[in-house]
Image (spheres, rainbow, N blue to C red):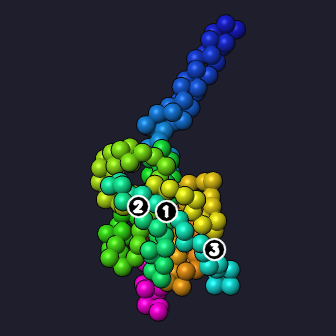
Amino acid sequence: MEPKKSKKSTIQNIVFIVLIALLLFSPLGTFVKVQLNRLIAFSPKTIAISDQKMLSTYQWKLKDATGKIVSLEAYKGKIVFINFWATWCPPCIAEMPSMQKLYADYQDKIVFLFVTTDSFEKANTFLIKESLDLPVYQSLSDPPSEMDSSTIPATYLIDKQNNLVLAKIGAADWNSDSFRKKLDSLLKKN
């Protein structure tokens, strides 16, 4: 009897290890992580006015997929939505559909910068696969220190007065009514 218990325990351990490996290292695991992140993503909160900071610099250079170089300086005085993301990041993938909906409705009103360290080929393949048409950039220089994060996704919103009004690390529901109201409110301000 003793050897059967040991064999059964070994089989259970192997099955457990295989399941963990599937969740950690396979597309199934990525799918599960993305879905969990979507379940826990809430509307982002803006920074209290008393805690908002102006950007220390607008001397940040970015390159788009066509090779065009832009500077954050070109967007000074405009509302700018900046998201740092990667194709391998489940929380990034989880929030992309809500960003796509937001982008579809606000692309003519505010500036969107989706910044990745992935190659443009990899990023564009991902966007096509996910039916997204977001403007992707790569950073050519360091972003302003107020947007320094070692974690992605990291999303920032700058108002017309050059204040950092939102800094969100992790997935969020960017298409929520409350975030849209905040954007509409910022658009009405001079």
Task: Tell me if residue 46 can be seen.
Answer: no
Q: Residues within 10 Å of mark 1 (few under 14, many from 20)?
A: some
Q: Residues within 10 Å of mark 2 (few under 14, many from 20)?
A: some
Identify the residue at image location x=34%, y=49%. Answer: 124
Mark whose residue sits in front, 3 or 2: 2
| Magenta-colored stretch includes residue 68 | no
Tag 1: amino acid: Lys
Tag 3: amino acid: Ser
Identify the residue at image location x=46%, y=60%. Answer: 62
Q: Is residue 64 above or below residue 185?
A: above
Tag 2: amino acid: Ile
Q: Is residue 111 above or below residue 10?
A: below
- Image x and y of residue 5, in percent: 66, 13
Task: Label 2, secondary structure: give it.
Answer: strand
Q: Disc 3 versus disc 2: distance between alpha carbons?
A: 21 Å
80 or 138: nearer the viewer: 138
Q: Earlier in the sequence, mark 3 or mark 1?
A: 3
Residue carrying label 2: 69
Q: Name the quarter where the N terminus is drawn.
A: top right
Does residue 58 appear left or right of residue 176 in this picture? Answer: right
Residue carrying label 3: 56
Q: Which residues are magenta?
A: 179-190
Q: Quadrant of residue 6?
A: top right
- Image x and y of residue 100, in percent: 36, 63
Q: Disc 1 versus disc 2: distance between alpha carbons?
A: 7 Å
Q: For the residues labelled 1 and 2, say whether their Cβ atoms are less than 8 Å apart.
A: yes
- Image x and y of residue 12, in percent: 59, 22
| Magenta-colored stretch includes residue 184 | yes
Identify the residue at image location x=35%, y=75%. Answer: 106
Residue carrying label 1: 61
